[in-house]
Amino acid sequence: MQLSIPVAFGLEQVVKRQLFSLGFDKAPAENGRISIEGDWSDVARLNVALRSGERVLIVLSRFSATTFDELYEGVYAIPWEDWLTVDSKILMDGKSQLSALGAIKALGGVAKKAIISRLADKVRTGRKTFSETGARTIVGISLYKDEATVTIDTSGDGLHKRGYRSLAYTAPIKETLAAGLIDMTFYNPEKDIEKPFADLFCGSGTLPIEACLRALRIAPGINRTFDFEHWACTPTDVAKLAREEAKALERRNEKPCIYGGDINPEAISIAKYHAKRAGVEKYIRFEVKNATAFRSEQKYGVLLSNPPYGERLSDTKAVQTLMRELGRVYRNLPDWNAYIFTGLEELERYFGKRADKKKKFSNANLPCGFYCYFGKPPKLESERGRYAFKQE
């Protein structure tokens, strides 16, 4: 099967590296999606283990469509009886770019009519309408330059919904984006499990939890279900085998050094609860603490934070002051690597130092920047000493 993985803007190379680590050496990216070849076991493994892809789609067909008649015929030609049952709950998802057919609602209506007609003709029920009380299947119709791509969504709910984040908190970062940002840092627990990772504005705990999941090799989707598990066409036990494979790779006996701090006690309470739901509460040190008071006795480490900004903190001067103070904190950690994800313009001006590397992102439809500050790499094993965070 041809599989397609939608990817958030800016994370294409990160997801390609994740796919490479899962054994996919050919993964071309185009128009915000990465294409790979795979079978049902790959569908299950990707849903369970992929950290930063948004969904796992099966591509059923591609064809030219400049009229609704061409769209109908192209969708009808797909052997839907191999994928759906007569009681499948069919939801439509569509988008169109640079194409003659641009009415999204109409696209979905025509495509769904073609699907129902095909099922009625091939299954021979004698009916033209169905109850749709069965398993959910999200059918995607994507038009780009008059070429239609038809997919079914094996994930259902987006892959960012790991299952551990249930309590609301101000402007949380998506889990898939958080995992991608972590992969863009020098935090590499595969080589150094004890290297400190710190988030000074942890909010509901997403960044420390995602760092811990990676450090312990815990698959992000191991504790949730996916739409494909309920389909009649899915081979028996394929999801079960994927979870068993992921479970065998875990290393819960390790001791990562991960810290999450926030000045708001409510945030820390929520973060601890989410960490418990993720099964990693004993591995992360959460603390109610002002970010400006952070210190570490360890010379080398990784600091990654998504500080409040813009709509998250309405007082612009307060944001600017906070970034100046954060810059002073980092100057006391000269050999650490620091990464700031923010929508604040001119961050470098207030942080007090030009970033070594910058990358553009979008978060909740807001333009954001990822500012990277690199410290010196450890030269000798003896320089590392004991990893610890300074208590005050």
Image (cartoon, rainbow, N blue to C red):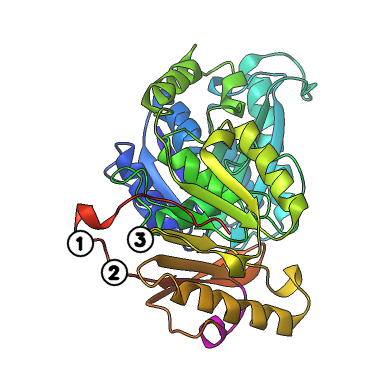
Q: Residue at 44% across / 23% down in the picture?
A: 247
Residue reaching furthest bottom?
349
Separation of residues labelled 2 and 1 (CA atoms):
9 Å
Residue linked to disc 3: 300
Quadrant containing the C terminus in the rendered view:
bottom right
Q: Which residues are magenta?
A: 343-350
Q: Where residue 113 sits: x, y (%)?
A: 71, 36
Residue 376's disc number: 2
Residue 352 sits above or below residue 90 on the image: below
Q: Does any portion of residue 334 appear in the rendered image?
A: yes
Q: Earlier in the sequence, mark 2 or mark 3?
A: 3
Q: Residues within 10 Å of mark 3 (few under 14, many from 20)?
A: many
- Badge 1: residue crowd in 10 Å (few <14, some 14–19, many ≥20): few
Q: Is residue 234 magenta?
A: no
Amino acid marked by disc 2: Lys
Image location of residue 154, percent across then percent down: 55, 32
Relative to residue 87, is residue 111 depicted above or below? Answer: below
Q: Residues within 10 Å of mark 2 (few under 14, many from 20)?
A: few
Is disc 1 placed on a helix, strand or loop? Answer: loop
CB atoms of marks 2 and 1 within 8 Å: yes
